[in-house]
Amino acid sequence: MPNGDTQKFDSLVLGGGIAGLAAALDLADAGYRVAVVEQGATIGGKMIRLSKVFPTLDCASCITTSKMAAAAHHPNITLFTMCRLEEAQRVDGQVRARVAQMPRYVDPAKCIGCRQCEYECPVMVPDQEQGGFTARKAIYIPFSNAIPQLALIDREHCMMCGKCSQVCPTGAVDQLQVEQEFVIEADTMVLATGFELMTDFPARAYGNPGLGDNVISSLQMERLLAPHGPYMRALRPGDGKEPESIAFIQCAGSRDLQLGKPYCSRVCCMYAIKQAMLLSGALPLADLTIYYMDIRAFGKNYEQFYNNAKAMGVEFVKAKPIIAGNNQGGSVVLRYEDQEGGSGAKTREHDLVVLSLAMLPAFAPEEIVPVSSATDGFLKVPQPKLAPTLTDMEGVFTCGAAAGPKDIVDSIAEAGAAAMGAAKYLAARRGGQAA
Amino acid sequence: MAEFPFLEVNEAIRLYGGEDLNACMQCGLCASVCPWREVESPFFARQMIRMGQLGLEGYESDEVLFGCTTCGKCVINCPREVDIIGIMRAMRSMVSEAGIRPETLKAASGSCHANGNPWSGKREDRLAWAKGLNVPKYGPDTEYLLFVCCTSCYDQRSQNIARSLVKLLDAAGVSYGIIGQEESCCGESMRKSGDEELFQKLAQSNIALFNREGVKKIITTSPHCLKTFVSEYPELGGEYEVVHSSQLLAHLAAEGKLKLSGTDGRKVAFHDPCYLGRHSNVFSEPRELLQSAGAEVVPMAREEAFSLCCGGGGGRVWMETPQEQRFSVLRVREAAQAGAEVLATSCPYCISLLEDSRKTEGLDDSLEVLEVSELLARDLT
């Protein structure tokens, strides 16, 4: 993309996760031309990184890849990966977005995704796509079903040995690439910027510093359970042992005024139940315990899912435990009050502890897009009841977790609503003409 | 037999100052982080709050209702930001008014009523600590009122804290003075232990005295006085600029007015008093002072906001705690494990309890317990 180039579309979708892709596909199917701008090296968002989804226990990869592929091959959709939105304003009736194409150090026109470079690269880096539990190379394709299948170089770790250039059959490695800026003009925009998990939870650690290697985040547990996970089985990361007892701590950061996160993250109850169910399949002899404040099984068939987990032997304990330390074998010591049993103080050891961490907004619009965010940091929707996808910027819509914690079902439903809102807006601007 | 809610009690607790009672959502984190989980104890804040919400009886014992040391660990963690100590205090005042109150606390309250201090010392002996020292009287031209905690006025071990402090203040050329006999206990522990009427009496008497003397700035030796002067006196008409001795000394050392030789050279662990640390957010000053005195500050397993209470707050300093339930025992063990030769702290209650546990743990020869001022006074140039 040459510097300063301008490209025109009907709609710009910011974020290539499941909500953004679903909105883009709806608009594209209706005949509108859509640009999907994604900051990461692949589309698919959080969903492609999950194991299975609740309450159907469908394989997340299987159902996400079809959407990713559909978007990638759609004649009306153009994907812009590794692109950062610098600024978007409405100028002369158009959303004018300045976008920075970050360098891959690999020419996307030449790379054929053969991974010769990756096999040859001598540098090993913790692979965040696998929860940091395994290594990847300094030149790499993010994961096997990433789209696009293009390599990129992690310049922070690359030692410029040149081996990748030597083996690349198409001469695609280009260490001289620099960031390029270009402009996308569109009539409407859909903000589908999603969420991140809270990262600073351990700093407060509920009373005792240091959480240890066998306390992991819920997204790390997704990787342990995924079909292409780091170990291909559920092992604990501290020492590679098969855990005999696994605990989930719910509301780890959510519904906590002290941490500035007073809201419920909505999906944690259900994914913890799902992960416990999957673990009972992967490790039939393991004890599974979910420590909760109250179980929020709000969606269609969710309560049944919860009841199934109880019937399967997953133990639900009403308590908010603290992590009191690690025992000599590396297991995590939890301490809590036995509220229901009334037997007072309890100390229990679990081989592995999963924190169901709070969902935080992944995008702060300030100084980038003139839309407001609400006090919780998620995008503000001024009419949450009657127009839940409408932002306070004309012709700009939002869907998925960008506007608040949400599960996949609701994200996709909202994506449809946002696409419909954008399509209606486009038609109105064109005198009632559809695409 | 089923228990039935008695909601008038719920309302009464809120009227007594436990406004947040119904904001508690019963997650139980307070009970999990509570220092009582380190030992055997029937005190669970969540359960007690639940009983209060429902107006049920059965929590009024010395170990439950009067067990809380008001260390504040639950408060800084509570996901609903519930003023748990406020609820505790309200429930204590309610039952105290009904005459249910630990005997030792009755004695401390009685002494405060009669003598203006909880240690059964005579009012005219309030300045016994200053004997032989030429401590200035507070006057119209004095900058700081030095308000010495009752504990350091009457307890022999604790008197040395005040004596050390005045040496440091003299050396740094600070304009300070004491009022003496007419001062009364700040009332912090009396209020937390549920004697609201007594607190009001003590606070009003001090405020009238301070205002008559034209006091603007106060140095406290105890973080408990600090907290109550800063947070509770203003609404009763007592607004002063209040510093704890460690804050002022750190400032003086940084300005070069307090000259230390920096030759201490020992391994010193610092125990954060609850009311200086968690309650007042003073963490770095005492540590900086210890370093200026040449001490090697060694970290303990739990520091700063994670610090473990000594067990003396909330009136517990006057109550008997069985040996195996004393937090101060755990704390001196932690200091010994950290390889410390000195366990320094900055609160008269902590000093009393840690001194005691140092002896019962047989650490007399290997571990010294010192207030920061005491350690510094030995290092004056």
Image: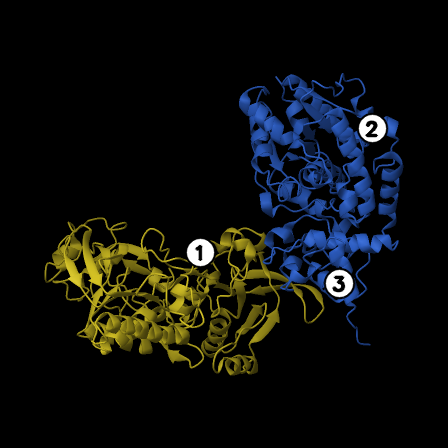
Q: Which chain is blue?
A: B
**Rendered image: mark on residue B10:** 3
User: Do the residues at discs 3 and 1 belong to one chain?
Assistant: no
Check chain identity for marks 3 and 2: say if they share one: yes
Please tell me which of labels 3 and 2 falls first in the chain: 3
Residue B182, numbered circle: 2
Among the 4 quarters of the image, the one containing residue B142: top right
Chain for disc number 3: B
Q: Which mark is residue A199?
A: 1
Give the image location of residue A19, x and y in percent: 34, 70
Judged left or right of residue A20, residue B21 is right
Q: Residue, x 69% and y 71% (percent of image)? A: A341
> Identity of the amino acid at label 2?
Glu
Q: CA distance from mark 3 to mark 1?
A: 39 Å
Q: Please, what secondary structure does the residue beneath circle 2 have?
A: loop
Count of all numbered marks drawn on residues in the image = 3
What chain does mark 1 sit on?
Answer: A
Structural crowding at the residue carrying mark 3, measured as other residues with C-alpha within 10 Å and reported as few (<14), some (14–19) or many (≥20) = many
Q: Colour of chain A?
A: yellow
Q: Name the amino acid type tagged 1.
A: Thr
* Residue A77 located left or right of residue B265: left
| CA separation in Å, label 3 and label 2 | 39 Å
